[in-house]
Image (cartoon, rainbow, N blue to C red):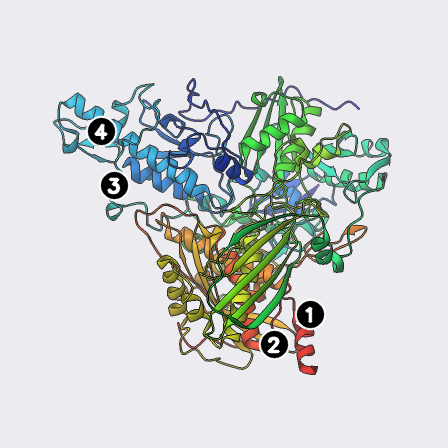
Amino acid sequence: MVAMTVNGKSVSVDADPETPLLYVLRNELELNGAKFGCGLGQCGACTVLVDGKAAISCLLPLAALEGRAITTLEGLGTAEAPGPVQAAFIEEQAAQCGYCIPGMIMRMAGLLAETPEPDDEEIRAALQPNLCRCGTHMRILRAARRAAGRPSEEDNFAFAGSGQNVGGTSS
Amino acid sequence: MTHHRSSSPLIPPITRRGFVAGAGSLTLSFALSGRAAAQSEESGVVDQTAELPGSLSKAPFLDSWIRIAADGAITVFTGKAELGQGIRTALHQIAAEMLGVDPQRIELLTADTDATPNEGYTAASHSMEESGSAIMNAAAEVRAILVQRAAERLGVDAETLRVEDGVVIGGPEDLAYNMLVDGETLHVRYEGRGRKPDPATYKIMGTPFPRTDIPAKLTGAPAYVQDLRLPGMVHARVIRPPVSGARLAEFDQAAVEAMPGVMAVVRNGNYLAVVASGEYQAVEAKRAAEGAARWTGGIALPERSEIYDRLQASAAEETVIHETDAGSGFPVKRLKARYTRPFQMHSSIGPSCAVGLFEDGRLTVWTHTQGVYPDRKAIAELLSMEENAVRLIHMPGAGCYGHNGADDAAADAALIATALPGRPVRVQWMREDEHLWEPYGSAMVVEASAGLAADGTIADWTYDVWSYPHSTRPGGAGNLIAGNLVADPFRLAPPTNIPQPAGGGDRNAVPPYDIPGARVTKHFVTDMTLRVSALRGLGAFMNVFSLESFVDELAEAAGADPVAFRLAMLDDPRAGDVVTAAATDFGWDGWTAPAPGFGRGFAYARYKNLAAYCAVAIELQVTPETGAIRIHRAVSSVDSGQIVNPNGVRNQIEGGIVQSASWTLFEEVLYSPDRIESRDWSAYPILRFDAVPASVRVRPIDRPGEPFLGTGECAQGPTAAAIANAVRDATGVRIRDLPYSPKRLQTALRETEFS
Ligand code: FES
Ligand code: FES
């Protein structure tokens, strides 16, 4: 039996202690936010917050979670009252299939908890572990900027190490 | 083995508000005819009465599309599926606009073999043209019928009446739609009686209406088939052979059955699956079963380095698909080039999943297939069941971009569910199941040769494309992995050539330009070495990459500006408009490199040479030391006819550009003679955030009143070629082999340095 807090509620889970958190969240706790993408720590679809930090739930065994506080997508808000990061993603219509987006939102929530005003390089770096196959990246970056309190007038997302964006000569 | 049956799990009956299957309302009949039969290769359905708009030709009764219940509830039906492309929202907008009702009052039902019309596959950018046109015309006619009824009842001229939010007003009495319908009113064939409103008056179509499905998906509401939890549901995993064609020689079944939670091992020939009460128990049972199984034989794969030579040397069906008369220009300069594209993956971010339930002789499968009807047919054949005893219900999955593992996972759920009657069975593929067993996009080779006349125009053009098939969709049970593995296996139906004008491997092989002395030949190779099928755009990605790279090579040889060179050969004004718009928005004229290593590239195509027009301009930077490419700006314009949702169009084009950049820069299926090596993301890298462009800008060009052309696939080819042309501009090196991996670029740059 492992006792932890999930989205502010105390829960005790009776399962094989090797079971990765992702399966516990999706099955025992019937939460949909964390998605199965690879089970290998390669894609970030399963990202949640553990004690406020973004973590890959598909590789975290239940045994390691005694006393920890887990936050999933559901803990950030609802469709009627979305949390600020969710609201930013909805505002930017940042989804195609949407399957990767919960992981992106959790990643951003984790970043903002540590770095309230991240710049573009920090946003790119924070999202680097997460894959999106639909190519929704521009909208995800726009939503990330919006969540960081500086909505984009126009795309010009700085690359890592560039200090600032080296734009073209026009547009 | 016996499995534990819970005390008769109660599955709630599947009901949907306001839906009663009207007798005969979904009766469909098909007749094969030449052109329509060709169409069926990709979308899977044959036109019966090709003159009706869109899919009305397949389901001509109005109540197949729209029903109005006595309580005023309006239900709109589409046979197409939401794949993340936003079709649900666009169709919703069309229905609301044409019916003249608040979108909130409409419920839209998508692909379900018990409820919606058979619209074949949701594929080939056809959904707006097929379902969008059908719903638009059906809704306009429903509105006209109801206004006419109101006029008769009120004894006034219909012209004096108008509709406001589902109420006919302007007469002596206001009449709501539901006061004007009874059971049979809409059970009539479409006749084209409805007058569509002037596009200038649209209030809902043409606006960036927010996607109706996004809030639920972004807050964790159950939205995907992966999220479906039925009472008493159990969990299955499949165990595949290490290589296609291998036989299961030995298997220690007892060891797996003894594991905690394991309820059943399903073995049928070379088909193997485990079922457990807990999901992670199923995962552990799968891993154990892999260790407990010994496989022999299997089909040897080619050496990766030999694939293109092998493709060109294979027996092929050859078709000359395009020829033009010789012109007057005499070639003074000749260019030749060979381009290659490796096998590439759909690689959905969420591996395929399905839930099956076999109860009282009836099978229900919840699936993210692109085609509930065709997949049902294949599954019924696999299980020797009547088709009408099988129901497939579409639920969203992760984006698929074509024929991925969805249909096969649905077949897995069906097959396993029949072994556990009364039990809902959820099958979730693991990452390697998807990477190793989805059908890939075909490897391809293009050879092009052209002469330039003294005046810098193209004097002649020869273009040959070699490709494996681009559709092996079901079809029959032989098109399913399970069908090939069961003890009494089904054989894959011989893949067929998708003919022009849409084409398969030769999609967009015909140049969109006015070129004399042209000859384009398709070499269709059916002897597949790896399993292949439809990947977004089919051959268009490779053909536009090759053709538009080659046009740039010719422009350079002619000393011409690449945009001007193209415009001079384009007759279609809509083509000219997207090219000019993209060039203008990019700032093409007067562009100079902002820093060393920068280059710009341009490309254009009209998807399938008959659908959406798209031009892409790219500015990128190459770091010679690492071979890394940074895309700074992608600027695009698109004309896909009448726009229903401009934000939806933008979303599709932005996504197409970024996904195509990933295909172009990074992607290649790795394999050796004894196995496929790309079993996870580390062996099949795709674009991550460090490589996301700094900026992507899309200008949708609206064509009010023009037919819907579909948007989903038109950016794939132009993006690849624009990147290729920009790399050439930045480095002086022309790379003709995909992908443009850092290693390939480094090697090419080093070679030019020392040559
Ligand atoms: S599912 Fe956890 S990283 Fe992919
Ligand atoms: S939106 Fe589909 S994978 Fe990201």
Dots 2, 1 in contact, CB < 8 A: no
Residue linked to disc 2: B623
Residue linked to disc 1: B743
* Circles 4 and 3 on the same chain: yes
Kind of residue sitting beneath label 2: Thr
* Circles 2 and 3 on the same chain: yes
Question: Is the distance from the Cβ of mark 3 to the nearest ligand 2 atom less than 8 Å?
Answer: no
Q: Is residue B210 above or below residue B333?
A: above
Looking at the rendered image, the quarter that the N terminus of chain B falls into is top right
- Residue B692 percent coordinates (x, y): 54, 64
Q: Using the rendered image of the protein, determine whether residue B205 is visible from the camera's viewpoint.
A: yes
Q: Residues within 10 Å of mark 1 (few under 14, many from 20)?
A: few
Q: Calculate the distance from the C-alpha at mark 2 to the C-alpha at mark 4.
A: 66 Å
What is the secondary structure assignment of the residue under circle 4?
A: helix
What is the secondary structure assignment of the residue under circle 2?
A: strand
The image's mark for residue B147 is: 4
Q: Calculate the distance from the C-alpha at mark 2 to the C-alpha at mark 1.
A: 12 Å
Of label 4 and label 3, which has the lower sequence position? 4
Q: Work out whether residue A49 or residue B424 is closer to the camera in this orientation and state it.
A: B424
Dots 2, 4 in contact, CB < 8 A: no
Kind of residue sitting beneath label 3: Pro
Chain ID for label 4? Answer: B
Q: Calculate the distance from the C-alpha at mark 1 to the C-alpha at mark 3.
A: 56 Å
Residue linked to disc 3: B197
Of label 2 and label 3, which has the lower sequence position? 3
What is the secondary structure assignment of the residue under circle 1?
A: helix
Looking at the rendered image, the quarter that the C terminus of chain B falls into is bottom right
Residue B117 left/right relative to B343: left
- Residue B24 percent coordinates (x, y): 43, 19
